Amino acid sequence: MTESVHVRAPGKINLALRVGAPDSTGYHPLTTVFQAVDLYEDVTATRTGASDGELTLSVVGRGAAAVPTDATNLAVRAAELLRETTGATAGAHLEIVKRVPVGGGMGGGSADAAAALLACDQLWGLGLDRAELVALGGQLGADVPFALTGLTAVGTGRGDVVTSAMSSGTYHWVLATQARGTPTPTVFAEFDELGGRTAAPPELDDDLLAALRAGDPLQLARHLANDLEEAALELRPELADVLAATDRAGALAAVVSGSGPTVAALCIDASHAQSVASVLRAAQVADDVLTVTAPTHGARVLEHVQRED
Ligand code: C5P
């Protein structure tokens, strides 16, 4: 019998990212507002005949060549963690279809881990509930819990403590992406180098959350913020050209997403997004320019196939 579970998990952008001083583990306490965008990672977990419980991985799609396919891959680590936690011994083959830019500050690897947790839980019939999966996700990486929950949320702690936030309507974004990613630890290290902080992260701007509740992109545009932006610009000076180009293209506002280098430009509606995207493409400041909408759902099962061979 062939059995497989197909899960889809979203990439994210950070509408606000406020960062504090690192703790004794080197992690930075932060306060962030996540929004899940309709650019998805697909993970299919297939039961293998292997009696040794082997976990194998293949990766296709955008930036796949840059993704490790060995045990260091976050999706494989997710499946391993699930087995260690539950005592399951079965193997699986994971196939990842990437669409979220690799190393782009959009949580693509975290989406893979979230999808792998959900897919393997179903495939192996473990029956963990969402809260248990979210707790495991937090052990894998700061952005994994949000990839499970999706929509719009406030993240605290390392970003892994996720509380859903109210949001009305649909937001239209243009994403300017770069083929070469920036490693997240390097950007946090640069943040510290540039002076960082000596205390807890600043409070979130209440007006940002009010704008989301009202579904008002003009209001939201005034409150986009990223404490890592200066560090990302220091490491990738070309991002200043991208930000300037989004301004010239008439976007409402733009912000570096997470640790970058993706720049997210907020637009008023779908046709505005198309026009901003075409000006950005013509400006040739990014390797790719995409339009996305948000918020969208967290990791969910699309298909569970059981077929007699
Ligand atoms: O949790 P995740 O694996 O995504 O984090 C990658 C790296 O980013 C961490 O090893 C750490 O260097 C940095 N980081 C941080 N503070 C956070 C989240 C990530 O310093 N809140």
Image: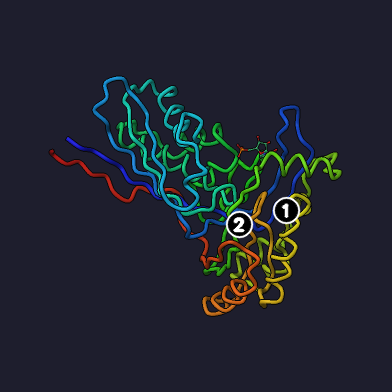
CA distance for labels 2 and 1: 10 Å
Find disc 1 in the rendering and name its residue.
Answer: 236
- The foreground one among 271 and 87 is 271
**Which dot marks residue 281?**
none
Q: Give me the residue at 76% from left, 56% from top.
A: 237
- What residue do we see at 71% from left, 41% from top? 186
**Whole-percent x and y of residue 125?**
30, 32
Horizontal side of 108 relative to 23 (left or right) equals left
Element under label 1?
Answer: loop
Q: Amino acid at mark 2?
A: Gln
> Tag 2's secondary structure?
loop
Which numbered disc flags the more N-terminal residue, 2 or 1? Answer: 2
| Contact flag, marks 2 and 1 (Cβ < 8 Å) | yes
Q: In this orientation, which residue lies closer to the viewer: 301 or 282? A: 282
Is residue 245 toward the left or the right of residue 163 in the image? Answer: right
Residue 229 in picture, x, y percent from top left: 74, 54
Relative to 27, is 225 above or below? below
Residue corresponding to mark 2: 178
Quadrant field for ligand 1: top right
